[in-house]
Image: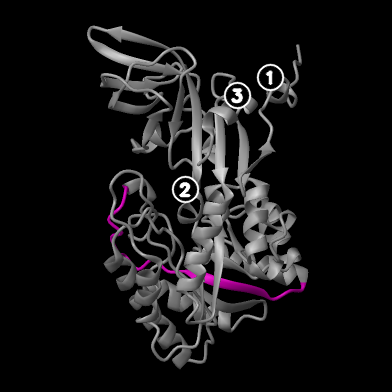
Amino acid sequence: MIDFKALSNKYGTPLYVYDFNKISEQYDALKKAFSGRKSLISYAVKANSNLSVISHLAKLGSGADCVSIGEVKRALLAGIPKYKIIFSGVGKRDDEIEEALKEDILLLNLESEAEMERVEMIAAKLGKEARISIRVNPNIDPKTHPYISTGLHENKFGVDLETAKRMYVKAHNSNHLDPVGIHFHIGSQLTELDPIKEAAGIVADLVRSLKAIKIDIKFFDVGGGLGIVYDDETTIEPYDYAQAIFSTLYGLDLTIICEPGRFMVGNSGYFLSKVLYEKVNEGKRFVIVDGAMNDLLRPSLYNAYHKVEVVGKEGNESEADIVGPVCESGDFFAKSRMLPPTEHNDLVVVYSAGAYGFVMASNYNTRPRPAEVAILDGKDHCIRQRETFEDLIKLETMCL
C-alpha cells in the first residue's frame, strides 16, 4: 500500500505519484500476450512523458511511439534504442522530419500524401532513404469518446484505403522512400474488441494486396488504445486483444507493433490534493481543494470520471462537488459524489491519473505545476521537482 499521507507531508500538494511496479506489471502482461509472434511494444510517450517513466520502460525492453521531435529526443535521452522509435503525428514540420531522419529511427508514420511528398523531398536532400509506414483510416467506429476517436473518415487521422494503395505504390517506386510498415489506430480508451478486430482485418487484407504487387511490408502497427478501469468499465484482456489481431494475420509474416499509453501508466498514477475548506451555496456543497484543472484537465476537458477518496475519513456522507481554485466553472475533479465531512488539510486522492495528467498540465492562473514522485519497490523518488514562480517567468522579459 502507498502511504499517501506520508508522501503529501514530504513533497507537498498538489502532487502526482506513480507506482512503477504497476507499470512493470502492465508492460509484462502485454508483452506476454504478444509473445506468440514477433512483436515490439512501443510505449506512447504522449500519455506520460516523464524521463523516469520512459527510462523505466526502456529497461523493460520497450520502444517508443512519439508524436513530436521533442518526444523523440526524450525517448533517446531516456535510453530507448533508435531502432525502437516511431515518429507519428498528423503534422510534422520540415525540421522535425529532417532531425528524425538524421537520428535514423525505426520509421516515420505518415498520414497524408502531402506529408509523404515532404518526407521524400527532405530525404533526397539528405541523401537518405526514409523508412516509412502509412496510417490507414479503416472507417471503423471505435465506440469511445468523440474527442479520442480516430478511426472514422470524419476524423483528421490517416488516409482511406485507396489513397493508401496509391501512396504505397509511389513510395515503392521512389529512390528515397522505403515503405516497411502499415499502421492503424482507431481511438483511445477502447473497451470493445470487435472494432479492433474488424479494423485489423481490413488492414491485413490491404497488406496481402500490397504483397501481391511485391511491396514487402514488415511491420504491422496496431496502434494503442486499450482501455483501463476508471469506474466500472469492462476492459479487454491483453490475451484476447492479441489473439483477435493474430486471427487476422493468417499467411502473413509480420512484426506486430503495439503502442500502449494509457494502458501502461493510467492506473499506476494518483493525484494528491489537500482540502482548503468547504462551502455551501443554497444547499449545494463544495469541497474546495488546492489542486485545479490546470493540474489535471481530464474531468473538465472530457467530463471524465475518476475515482476520488478522502483519506482516512468516515462519517455521514452527503453529495458534494470537488472543485479547485481556478476561476472557471469547469474547474472540478468530481461532481455529485457522496463524501464524508472534510476539514482543512484533509487529503484527497484522485485515482487513475497516470495517463494524460501531468502531460496536459499548464500554468493557467500563474499556477506552478506539481511535483512528480515515483514509487519503486516501496521507496519513493522525486522524478520532477515542483515548479516555482521563478520557473514560470524565467523566459519572459519586460521590454518597456
Give the mark nearest the N terminus, 2 or 3: 3
Q: Which mark is residue 272?
A: none
Tell me the residue that label 1 is attached to: 389
Name the element at disc 2: helix
Alpha carbon of mark 2 to alpha carbon of mark 1: how far?
29 Å
The front one of 365 and 25 is 25
Circle 2 crowding by C-alpha within 10 Å: few under 14, some 14–19, many from 20? many
Please say if the residues under marks 2 and 1 sit with CB atoms less than 8 Å apart: no
Magenta residues span 127-145
Tell me the residue that label 2 is attached to: 266
Q: Residue at x 33, y 35 (%)?
A: 303
Residue 121: image location, x then y, percent: 67, 67
Give the mark nearest the N terminus, 3 or 1: 3
Amino acid identity at mark 2: Gly
| Res. 135 in view | yes
Examine the rendered structure and indicate whether residue 326 appears above or below residue 151.
above
